[in-house]
Image (cartoon, rainbow, N blue to C red):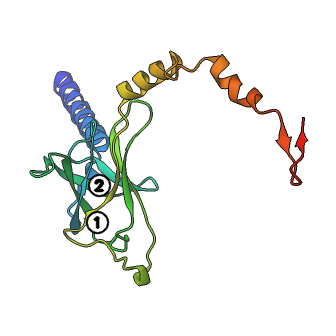
Amino acid sequence: MQTKKSEIWVGIFLLVAMLAALFICLKAADVASMRSEPTYRIYATFDNIGGLKAHSPVRIGGVVVGRVADISLDQKTYLPRVALDIEERYNQIPDTSSLAIRTSGLLGEQYLALNVGFDDPELGTSMLKEGSTLQDTKSAIVLEDLIGQFLYNSKGGDNKSSDDAAAPASANTETTSPAGQTNP
């Protein structure tokens, strides 16, 4: 009788532990934001998408407003073309908005930052709708490129000598007054 009771308690404990592990996994995967709300699809083309992946978040000011639906290669330009599913409730985004690939923290996941543009119907702007393409995009910053650029600049990418730089400043020491007289 005593062993059966302890087996039941162990079973309950294991069940609670598995439910807690499932809850933590779902929170880590951010499943709550992948619910089936109505969305509309827009597109953007980048030079370099870095480590951007499908299902990466699209954020406006840190608030998730959509997800990356698909990443493909444009057949004409051979540049990465990103399809974004934006939640229908965020349907007042002007077509003058811009997209930038950002990183959460130093080495965190990459996401798309949507910077809302201006809305001026007199200038011909409109709101994004199904099938729209955002023109203003900023590609991912590749850490290796930044390090290479830093090393290039620190080794003296500009090979001007200090004598060449000082020559133009000391070459013209005389000034001319409006009356045509030279002032030493």
Q: Position of residue 169 (x, y in %)?
A: 74, 30
Closest to the observer: 37 or 178? 178
Which residue is tagged 1? 87
* Image side of residue 103 versus residue 43, left or right: right
Q: Quadrant of residue 3?
A: top left
Q: Is residue 24 left or right of residue 175?
A: left
Q: CA distance from mark 1 to mark 2?
A: 10 Å
**Residues packed near mark 1 inside 10 Å, few (<14), some (14 to 19) or many (20 plus):** some
- Mark earlier in primary sequence (1, 2): 2
Q: Which residue is mark 2?
A: 33
Please report the residue visible at 29 percent of the width from the left and 47 percent of the height from the top. Answer: 30
Q: Give the position of the N terminus as an image quadrant.
A: top left
30 displayed left or right of 72: right
Q: Which percent across, then down, holds residue 182?
A: 88, 42
Could you tell me residue 73's position as x and y percent? 13, 47
Q: Nearer the viewer, residue 19 or 5?
A: 19
| Residue 1: numbered disc | none
On screen, residue 175 above or below 128? above
Residue at image x 37%, y 76%? 125
Q: Which one is nearer the viewer's eye here, 108 or 146?
A: 146
For marks 1 and 2, give the one nearer the viewer: 1
User: Mark 2: few, some, or many residues within 10 Å (few <14, many ≥20)?
Assistant: some
Residue placed furthest toward the left = 75
Q: Amino acid at mark 2?
A: Ser
